Amino acid sequence: MKLLVGTTNGRVPFISVDSTDNVTRLTSLSNLAASYSLAGSSSTQMTTPTVYGADSILMPGVWWLDVDEPNMTDITLDEETLTIHITADSMAPVTLALEVSKISEREVYDQVTAIGTTVSNINSNIDVAISTRASATDYTPSRAISLDYLDQNISLIGTTVSDNSTDINTLLTRITNQRATNLDYLDQLLSLVGTTVASNATDINTLLTRLTSQRATNLDYLDVAVSSISPPSAASIADAVYDEATAGHTVSNTFGEVLHVIYGLSHVNFVLDNTTFNSSGLMLSGRYRVFADAAAATAATDGGTGEGEIYSFTVTATAESTANRIALYRVVKD
């Protein structure tokens, strides 16, 4: 789920289950508390956490928490992660990881659309420049050299750019500084043409020789390549983000790392070791280590360190004095 920077009226969903069996849905909550950490900062207790039950009959155990306190989404980078930890009586603790962004997917789509409009304008300007060329009597040897500059750049594009997005991107890069400068040269030369060149038949014949059918074909390639460009859709941009492989996304304090940790705390690719027990067999302490993949978790040893774990958590428990059961169970990131 994504929140925009500065949001104070957002809501995030979570599911409450009984802490005894981790299955039974809870339709009422008491003594609810919530803390949050933004981009790896120290934990901050929410002053008045507010929750709403979705429907105790049709959606038992489904709740919404208001993200309504100041500074919860005040990020400095373009995108950062907000982690919220929720507790309540008889409820298994819930940890949420949310993406906070300075720009929405709709704004990204609008910017890409604007780029497409800019490219379309470039195509129109090139069409105008080509269609308003001077007559044959106005061309000089200097102008012929300028046309050679343009021809050399266009001939580098090739004939395969029409259906190849990589070639189109290369073309857009080339239609920049040097090509714009060459077109400026052409405009300046055309504005300096005088009436005396008409008597120079040799120069005109040389120019007409250079204006070949191949050069006209190259200009057609340029028109087709530029006019066929269309921006990617908002859906394709979103698909590219969610289809990204998780491998390698383990950099500290990033959204990818948090997803690995959530995966591990869901009892996937994690190791519990360094355990101690009381005389009744209840576990009093231990350590959770979360790994990026199954191979690393399988190779981990009891009490080992530096074996590829992403995060390590210290587990402590307190037994009730009059009964053989856990009174307090705590998991803290090392």
Image (cartoon, rainbow, N blue to C red):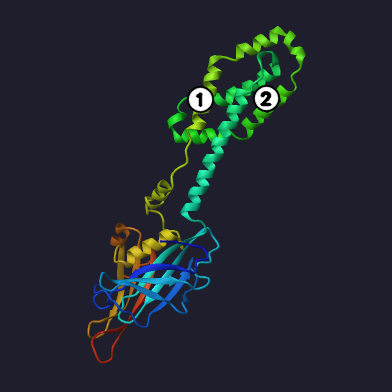
Circle 2 sits in a helix, a strand or a loop, which is it? Answer: helix
| Relative image position of residue 189 (x, y in whole percent) | 71, 23
Q: Callout 2, which amino acid?
A: Leu
| Relative image position of residue 1 (x, y in whole percent) | 40, 61
Q: Residue at x 70, y 22 (%)?
A: 190
Q: Marks 2 and 1, Cα distance to the nearest angstrom? A: 20 Å
| Relative image position of residue 233 (x, y in whole percent) | 43, 45
Question: In the rendered image, which quarter is residue 49 located in?
Answer: bottom left
| Residue with the most extreme bottom position | 322
Horizontal side of 191 relative to 159 (left or right) equals right
- Which quadrant would the C terminus be assigned to in this image? bottom left
Q: Are marks 2 and 1 in contact (CB under 8 Å)?
A: no
Q: Nearer the viewer, residue 332 or 130?
A: 130
Circle 1 sits in a helix, a strand or a loop, which is it? Answer: helix
Q: Estimate how packed mark 1 is, as few (under 14), some (14 to 19) or many (20 or more) residues with alpha carbons within 10 Å.
A: some
Horizontal side of 89 relative to 238 (left or right) equals left
| Relative image position of residue 29 (x, y in whole percent) | 33, 79
Question: Can residue 332 be seen from the camera position used here?
Answer: no
Q: Decide: is 281 above or below 312.
A: below
Which residue, given by chain and number where applicable, does mark 1 sit on? Answer: 221
Which residue, given by chain and number where applicable, does mark 2 sit on? Answer: 186
Q: Decide: is 108 above or below 118.
A: below
Q: Estimate how packed mark 2 is, as few (under 14), some (14 to 19) or many (20 or more) residues with alpha carbons within 10 Å.
A: many
Q: Nearer the viewer, residue 310 or 63?
A: 63
Q: Callout 1, which amino acid?
A: Tyr
Query: Which is nearer the N-term, disc 2 or disc 1?
Result: 2
